Image (cartoon, rainbow, N blue to C red):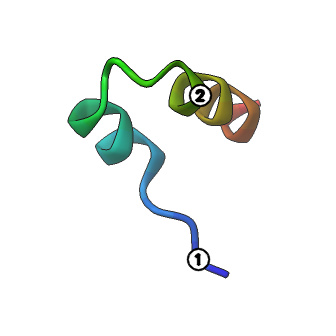
Amino acid sequence: PKLPDPIKFLVENPSVPRCKSWYETVAS
């Protein structure tokens, strides 16, 4: 399954802690 663009998702949802954790996991 394709994941949404994590950077775009973070920009659109900056207050979602779960998103930040997910982005950090994907980025590492």
Across and down, in percent, residue 21 comes to: 66, 24
Earlier residue among tags 2 and 1: 1
Q: Is residue 3 shown above or below 11? A: below
Q: Which residue is mark 1?
A: 2
Q: x, y percentage for residue 3?
A: 56, 66
Could you tell me if the residues under marks 2 and 1 are in contact, i.e. CB atoms within 8 Å? no
**Circle number at residue 13:** none
13 vs 5: above or below? above
Q: For mark 1, does the 10 Å Cα neighbourhood hold few (<14), some (14 to 19), or many (20 or more) residues?
A: few
What is the three-letter code of the residue carrying label 1? Answer: Lys
Q: Nearer the viewer, residue 27 or 3?
A: 3
Q: In the figure, is residue 4 to the left or right of 10?
A: right
Image quarter hosting the C terminus: top right
What amino acid is found at the position of numbered circle 2 in the picture?
Arg
Residue under the image location 31 percent in, 22 percent down: 14
Q: Which residue is mark 2?
A: 18
Task: Left or right? Give the position of 18 relative to 8.
Answer: right
Q: Position of residue 25 (x, y in %)?
A: 75, 32
Q: Is residue 12 left or right of residue 14?
A: left
